Image (cartoon, helix red, strand yellow):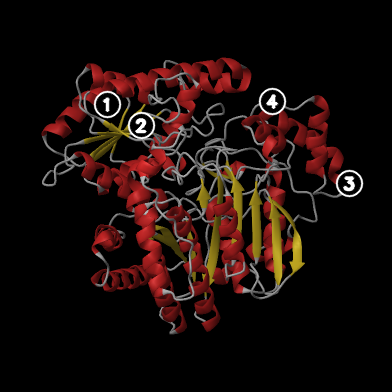
Amino acid sequence: MNFKEQIIQGIPSVLPEAKPYPADANRAPKRKDILSAEEKQLAVRNALRYFPKQWHQELAQEFAQELKDFGRIYMYRFKPSYELKARSVSDYPAKCEQAAAIMLMIDNNLDPAVAQHPEELITYGGNGAVFQNWAQYLLTMQYLSEMESDQTLHIYSGHPMGLFPSSTDAPRVVVTNGMMIPNYSKPDDWEKFNALGVTQYGQMTAGSFMYIGPQGIVHGTTITVMNAFRKVLNKDESPKGKIFLTAGLGGMSGAQPKAGNIANCITVCAEVNPKAATKRHQQGWVDELIDDMDLLIARVKKAQANEEVVSIAFIGNVVDVWETFYEKEVFVHLGSDQTSLHNPWSGGYYPVDISYEESNRLIREEPEVFKVKVQETLKRHADAVNNHTARGTYFFDYGNAFLLEASRAGGDVMAENGVDFKYPSYVQDILGPMCFDYGFGPFRWVCASGNPEDLDKTDAIAAKVLNKIMQESPQEIQQQMQDNITWINDAKQNKLVVGSQARILYADAQGRMEIAKAFNDAINQGEIGPVVLGRDHHDVSGTDSPFRETSNIYDGSRFTADMAIHNVIGDSFRGATWVSIHNGGGVGWGEVTNGGFGMLLDGTQDAERRLKSMLLFDVNNGIARRSWARNEEANFAIKREMERTPKLKVTLANLVDDDILNELSL
């Protein structure tokens, strides 16, 4: 069968031969053995329901072995034989172009050049899954090939429940991931119910088919690091020769050294997995690999002396780096961490003084010992950071739950009030007040033709639109505009594309709408092919995350999730091609609710109507919530939007004098 025939077939009519796992695959860690014997039978029973009864005897044994070996049933036998990558939208068998665009995005998320653990359908973060198993992938692609423009596919945590009649204005796909009853949303609940095959962790953009490789986080990290240096350096001082010390090179965290290069500093990024570090070096995302601490110290001191711009991957544990840099008096200007601490017990963070291989053995065979070692390391990690900050290092939490897990381990990371952390989230200090409150967030697009020339043209269109808007922008957002104009002008030379022909920049509602309309006009005129719009969930409106996206909400509502729910519902009836809502994300299962969308631009007037309606709401929903929380920048932004959009009327907060409250006897 050719590529199109395999997709149309879905679950094969003939049982395929079992296949060995590739020897060089970057395997997902074995998951916790948490099911009872009876529950393991249920997990196998659940897996077998995808297949005809005559296959059950053979597959039952195989799936039971997968569950024993990996802690999950991935159904690897059913992985398709064709190459998984983002093809041109015209290459997919589909009755409507919207469905073909979604197929393209799904395949991009599973491309081995993009995905962290592609054999297990995991895109990034150690557990950010597109689907739970290969049967779900096959059925979803089959449904999309059959879908007509008045049907909607509903996907429950990777499982395609089916095509339902809807309307041409409805989303073509509605995705949920991990939406648990609140009292069943602890980490072990994910382990149990994911092993049973009834829920999954979609992270943010993995389970919503909107991941575009590390480019997305490169941009966010670049903006963060640039502005962090602006906080700690004098205006006439350059980041050249200044150190940004961090950890993590797998999945999204692999973008850090590339971002450091763009920000013009020395980046030292520790990674315990040699395969992950080597992959990033081969891809050109990090300049140098070093696995010896003495060589690292010598190289860093030379780079400091010469005021170099260079990124270095250290194959080893970041705690050793923090401690040795302190001992050798290597001054660190910026410090952070991007290991997957939302997943601390299953390979998201590794203990110091234990080899990578031994740690993986402990995860499988002695999970409680591994947990103790991780928590001991977190306390050492916190102590080392504290030593550096006492010397003047600016440390920020990158929203990966480092401070949260360090506090749970007993690390010295709490503020004097015993409630807050002593170090800010990067959203609190940087992205929140400087970007999100003004409506600036990660707007992204994918050229569905797969043609690099289309990407070049969209870059030029976006740059032209931003330059025009900047001429009329108020002083409050001039820096944000200029940073993104610089970014888009340099995007191609920074070689950011991995997988699909995609791009990202930060824009507010006006910028997103005007760029999208310009794309749609270019499609209409035959200058470029169709374009898929989307964003990271890490944005103004899409995510309620008290330790990251909404960490600069101070009215007591940061632990509520109304905004994310309203966002995905509101996007769904305003024109999104697909919508998604997830429990869990970069800060952990049960710690965040986040939603996303995708929208196909096809050059029609209908697409223009949809983009104007949906993008306006998608951004201003969050600005309104931030304004109601009394955030000054958001108040400015929503008033400005109401002046531009007469039918937008938002409830504004009345400010209270502190003296009135201080006089109260409470």
Point out residue 93 in the picture as x, y percentages from the top left corner: 65, 69
What's the residue at 56%, 38% (across, down)?
Answer: 591
Residue carrying label 2: 423
Question: Pointer 1 and pointer 2: residues touching (CB < 8 Å)?
Answer: yes
Q: Amino acid at mark 2?
A: Tyr
Disc 3 and disc 2: Cα gap in Å? 59 Å
Label 4 vs 2, first from the N-terminus? 4
What's the residue at 46%, 45% (across, down)?
Answer: 555
| Number of marks present in the image shown | 4
What's the residue at 45%, 36% (across, down)?
Answer: 400
Residue carrying label 1: 389
Q: Amino acid at mark 3?
A: Gln
Point out residue 528 in the picture as x, y percentages from the top left corner: 43, 76
The residue mark sitting in front, 4 or 1, is 1
Of the pair 168 and 309, the residue shown nearer to us: 168
Q: Amino acid at mark 4?
A: Asp
Label 4 vs 1, first from the N-terminus? 4
Label 1 vs 2, first from the N-terminus? 1
Q: Residue 397 falls in which quadrant of the image?
A: top left
Residue 33 badge: 4
What's the residue at 55%, 60% (across, down)?
Answer: 597
The residue mark sitting in front, 4 or 3, is 4
Q: Is residue 2 above or below residue 321?
A: below
Residue carrying label 3: 54
